[in-house]
């Protein structure tokens, strides 16, 4: 009997094209769904072999490789990573961070400190907590919750994908398929590429299926998956990853990269 490949993914709309029929393309995959932050913890604990994890946790992991040319990112607005604020960037003194976030939480810190020169305090917002009556100046929401959010108490809604690209000129990569050290994907690697191709080709059907539960328009969902989210991990995306790591290192959010990075790792 083939040993199951324990794979963890996120149950957000932006992930659906990457996992559509994934277990059909590789029947030995045992797929579970969880929050990005929890997937990172489970991969680090050895409970998963492959996880669609926040890129900041990929850099923190140290002994991970990634499935080539598959990612979740954006070049410009991302629509699902938003900092809602009562005041302009320069006046933010306290921030609540979505419990599900790691990459976007670090990105919030990077933009606030490196671009706007402010060092607010941070606290965690539980995944099941409301966000419309918080004491903090700003709140970071990610994923489907950010797409559905309507927070009239917050004057500003800052799209962090848009902020990043306007600042750096580079794409922002939020998540990759990280492979734990010692795990050999073998033929299963092809399944991740086939699932991506199939999912994007059928984005309209996915949108029709998922939109009602999200209370969003199917056309909006389809445009989000096909025109907003970027699922490739090419040279420009890798350049964005390197810039993100560089800034995260400067703030002590990740350890410095090894001097002699190994091939196949986004150092």
Image (tube, rainbow, N blue to C red):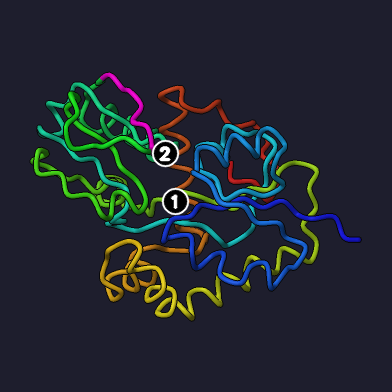
Q: Dividing the picture into quarters, in which one does residue 134 lie?
A: top left
Q: Secondary structure at mark 1?
A: strand
Quadrant of the rendering where the N terminus is positioned: bottom right
Residue 212 lies, with reference to residue 179, above or below; the image says: below
The single residue placed furthest to the right in the displayed view is 1
- Residue at which label 2 appears: 101
Residue 151 lies, with reference to residue 91, above or below; the image says: below
Give the mark nearer the N terminus: 1 vs 2. 2
- Front residue of 16/172: it is 16
Q: Report the residue at 38% width, 63% height from top.
A: 229
Q: Report the residue at 33% width, 23% height from top.
A: 123
Q: Position of residue 30 (x, y in %)?
A: 71, 56
Magenta residues (range) = 121-127
- Front residue of 142/235: it is 142
Within 10 Å of disc 1 (Cα), the crowding (few <14, some 14-19, many 20+) is many
Q: Is 110 contained in the magenta span?
A: no
Secondary structure mostly seen in the magenta stretch = strand
Q: Position of residue 194 (x, y in %)?
A: 63, 73
- Front residue of 121/233: it is 121
Q: Position of residue 121 (x, y in %)?
A: 27, 19
């Amino acid at each position: 009997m083939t040993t199951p490949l324990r794979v963890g993914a996120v149950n957000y709309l932006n992930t659906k094209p990457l996992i559509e029929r994934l277990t059909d393309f590789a029947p030995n995959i045992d797929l579970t769904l969880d929050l990005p932050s929890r997937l990172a913890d489970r991969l680090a604990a050895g409970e998963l072999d492959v996880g669609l994890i926040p890129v900041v946790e990929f850099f923190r992991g140290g002994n991970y490789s990634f499935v080539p040319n598959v990612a979740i990112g954006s070049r410009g607005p991302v629509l699902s990573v938003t900092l809602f604020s009562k005041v302009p960037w320069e006046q933010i003194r306290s921030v609540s961070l979505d419990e599900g976030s790691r990459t976007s939480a670090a990105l919030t810190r990077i933009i606030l400190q490196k671009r706007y020169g402010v060092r607010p305090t941070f606290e965690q917002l539980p995944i099941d907590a409301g966000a419309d009556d918080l004491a903090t100046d700003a709140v970071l929401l990610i994923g489907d919750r950010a797409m559905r959010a309507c927070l009239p108490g917050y004057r500003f809604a800052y799209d962090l994908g848009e902020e990043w690209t306007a600042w750096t000129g580079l794409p922002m990569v939020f998540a990759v398929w990280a492979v734990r050290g010692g795990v050999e994907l073998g033929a299963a690697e092809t399944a991740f590429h086939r699932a991506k191709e199939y999912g994007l080709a059928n984005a309209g059907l996915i949108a029709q299926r998922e939109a009602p539960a999200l209370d969003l328009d199917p056309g909006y969902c389809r445009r989000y998956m096909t025109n907003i989210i970027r699922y490739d991990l090419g040279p420009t995306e890798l350049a964005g990853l390197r810039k993100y790591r560089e800034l995260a290192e400067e703030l002590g959010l990740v350890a410095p990269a090894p001097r002699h990075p190994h091939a196949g790792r986004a150092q």
